[in-house]
Amino acid sequence: AQTKPSREKPIGSEPPHIYAIADRMYRLLLSSGDSQAIIVSGPSGAGKTETCKLVLKHLAYVTKHLSEAGMSKSSMELGALLVMTNPLLEAFGNAETNLNRNSSRFGKFTQIHVSKKGAILGASIQTYLLEATRVVVHAERNCNYHIFYQIVAGLSSSEKASCQLESDANKYAYLRNATGKATARPGGRVGGGGDAAEFKDSLSVLQKIGVSEKLIASLWETLSGLLALGNITYGETVNGDACIQNTKALGAACK
């Protein structure tokens, strides 16, 4: 309902709003037949992530009554599916910083394919420039990527046992910040139900886009292995050779 005031109205006739920009782009696409683009930029905490969600939400809304012959899903279903993938992208690519609880640490190019009638046919999402160093070190009041905290809080006891995963984030070097302790995350990624609830959101997206249970289990094992890898410590033998001191962490990482 929030998108209705911006539909098919010229820029400037209503107060500035991202829905108006998205609608203008969509109308130009249909009238000209040329590809259109929206560039979302700004400093940390400016609202880039939320703005991208609103653009996708508007496109899903304005195409909800359209369909294309031969497509297994309607334009509305494809649009909703595209919007739905955001929690998963944020889990793996966003992290808490001093300025922003849900800061994107990567660039994203979302390409939406539209028919001549305006129906959504599909989409592709390309990511780039992921801040890889955040996995191994982050400053005070900063966090690693959300997904690591989500699996610690959200996996069942049996799943954690299978992955050799601890239930305390403070036990993992990769989850501790410069103070030596894990940053408290009472509200999780978006200040809602916390990491356990957001883990369910991430899992739900994986299941809805067709990822098999076997592959999902392998994903949790891989992430758990990365956390264990960060706990490996090194030392020196009497002969001056390097050696691994924490064999337990090595075993968990190799499992």
Image (cartoon, rainbow, N blue to C red):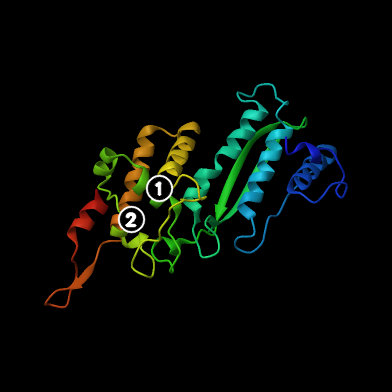
Task: Name above or below for residue 49 compared with residue 245.
Answer: above
Across and down, in percent, residue 105 comes to 53, 59
Residue at horizontal 60 percent and vertical 38 percent from the top: 82
Across and down, in percent, residue 119 comes to 72, 31
**Looking at the picture, which amino acid does disc 1 mark?**
Gln
Residue at horizontal 49 percent and vertical 61 percent from the top: 131
Q: Secondary structure at mark 2?
A: helix
Residue at horizontal 80 percent and vertical 41 percent from the top: 6
Task: Name above or below for residue 75 compared with residue 111.
Answer: above
Kindly give the residue lying farthest to the left in the view shown. 238
Q: Which residue is mark 1?
A: 150
Q: Is 234 on the left or on the right of 82, as rendered?
A: left
Q: Is 255 on the left or on the right of 138, as rendered?
A: left
Q: Tag 2: Cα neighbours inside 10 Å, few (<14), some, or many (≥20)?
A: many
Q: Of the residues under marks 1 and 2, which one precedes in the sequence?
A: 1
Residue at horizontal 60 percent and vertical 42 percent from the top: 124
Kindly give the residue lying farthest to the top in the view shown. 69
Q: Quote the CA–CA distance across marks 1 and 2.
A: 10 Å
Q: Which mark is residue 238?
A: none
Task: Name above or below for residue 193 compared with residue 102.
Answer: above
Q: Closest to the observer: 195 or 159? A: 195
Q: Which residue is mark 2?
A: 169
Q: Is 221 on the left or on the right of 110, as rendered?
A: left
Across and down, in percent, residue 193 comes to 46, 44
Q: Closest to the observer: 243 or 145? A: 145
Q: Secondary structure at mark 1?
A: helix
Q: Where is residue 235, by image quadrant?
A: bottom left
Q: Is 44 on the left or on the right of 88, as rendered?
A: right
**Looking at the picture, which amino acid does disc 2 mark?**
Ala
Q: Tag 1: Cα neighbours inside 10 Å, few (<14), some, or many (≥20)?
A: many
Across and down, in percent, residue 126 comes to 57, 49
Q: Where is residue 220, by image quadrant?
A: top left
